[in-house]
Image (cartoon, rainbow, N blue to C red):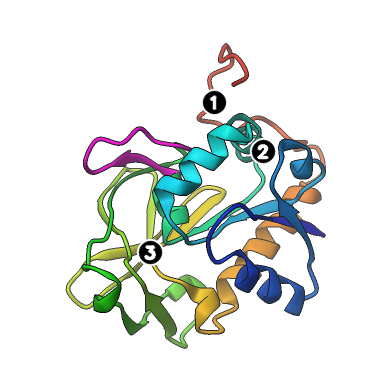
């Protein structure tokens, strides 16, 4: 199984190490051709504005959207969550509008206000997830098709899933929390080997007449 990690800026090395640790062939993604043959993709934390500029400069936006629209699973953490949102508080244009959510940047303050918390994430089992929040976003609104995976004690939404796309406001890779990556690989295996007769079809949110980006 080959899973890509967007390697243009941010905490990509930790994701790569975590995926290799569970037996995945990791493909560093810097250019569109690196996406060929991937079964899934990780968008790491980092600086979302810088990542946006590099994604546009290197022509990655359309090819990554095409990969997700084809059904390949995508995991975004921290800044990766911002990149995946359909709506970003403050008015920035979305980059990969795959998650029907509104996110707010730096919702908990500056880097000095970073914190850690244990979260209940039922989809990952009974053991709490130890989450590291660094200049983290928060989800202010979720669409009808979005599943909330985790909340803070105050009710703030910090992990979501919509079909083949998962996003967390925190960094599971910094606490050694491997279960989100295992979930990604499970979804990637299903993408690589669809049920008999199902085939691979475009993502249901993609309009049939939509021109390639």
Horizontal and vertical percent for residue 190?
73, 54
Using the rendered view, name the quadrant where residue 161 is placed. Answer: bottom left
Name the quarter where the N terminus is drawn.
bottom right
Horizontal and vertical percent for residue 167?
46, 57
| Residue where numbered disc 1 is placed | 206
Q: Tell which circle, 2 or 1, labels the residue nearer the N-terminal end.
A: 2
Using the rendered view, name the quadrant where residue 208 is placed. Answer: top right
Considering every residue shown, the one lying at the far bottom of the view is 127
Residue under the image location 31 percent in, 39 percent down = 87
Q: Tell which circle, 2 or 3, labels the residue nearer the N-terminal end.
A: 2
Magenta range: 84-96
Task: Report the mark closest to the observer, 2 or 1.
Answer: 2
Residue under the image location 48 percent in, 71 percent down = 123
| Residue where numbered disc 3 is placed | 169
Q: CA distance from mark 2 to mark 1?
A: 12 Å
Q: Nearest the camera: 148 or 25?
A: 25
Q: Residues within 10 Å of mark 2 (few under 14, many from 20)?
A: many
| Residue where numbered disc 2 is placed | 67
- Asked if marks 2 and 1 touch (Cβ < 8 Å), the reply is no
């Amino acid at each position: 199984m080959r899973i890509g990690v967007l390697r243009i800026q941010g905490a990509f090395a930790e994701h790569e190490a975590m995926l290799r640790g569970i037996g995945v062939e990791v493909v560093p993604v810097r250019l569109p051709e690196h996406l060929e043959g991937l079964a899934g993709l990780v968008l790491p934390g980092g600086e979302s504005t810088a990542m946006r500029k590099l994604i546009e400069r290197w022509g990655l936006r359309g090819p990554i959207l095409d990969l997700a629209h084809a059904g390949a699973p995508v995991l975004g953490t921290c800044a990766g969550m911002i990149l995946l949102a359909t709506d970003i508080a403050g008015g920035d244009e979305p980059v990969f509008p795959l998650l029907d959510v509104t996110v707010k940047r730096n919702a908990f303050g500056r880097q000095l206000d970073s914190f850690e918390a244990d979260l209940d994430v039922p989809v990952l089992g009974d053991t709490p997830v130890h989450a590291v929040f660094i200049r983290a976003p928060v989800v202010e609104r979720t669409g009808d098709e979005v599943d909330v995976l985790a909340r803070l004690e105050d009710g703030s939404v910090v992990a979501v899933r919509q079909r083949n796309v998962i996003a967390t406001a925190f960094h599971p890779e910094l606490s050694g929390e491997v279960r989100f990556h295992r979930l990604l690989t499970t979804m990637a295996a299903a993408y690589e080997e669809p049920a008999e007769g199902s085939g691979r079809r475009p993502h249901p949110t993609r309009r049939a007449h939509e021109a390639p980006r």
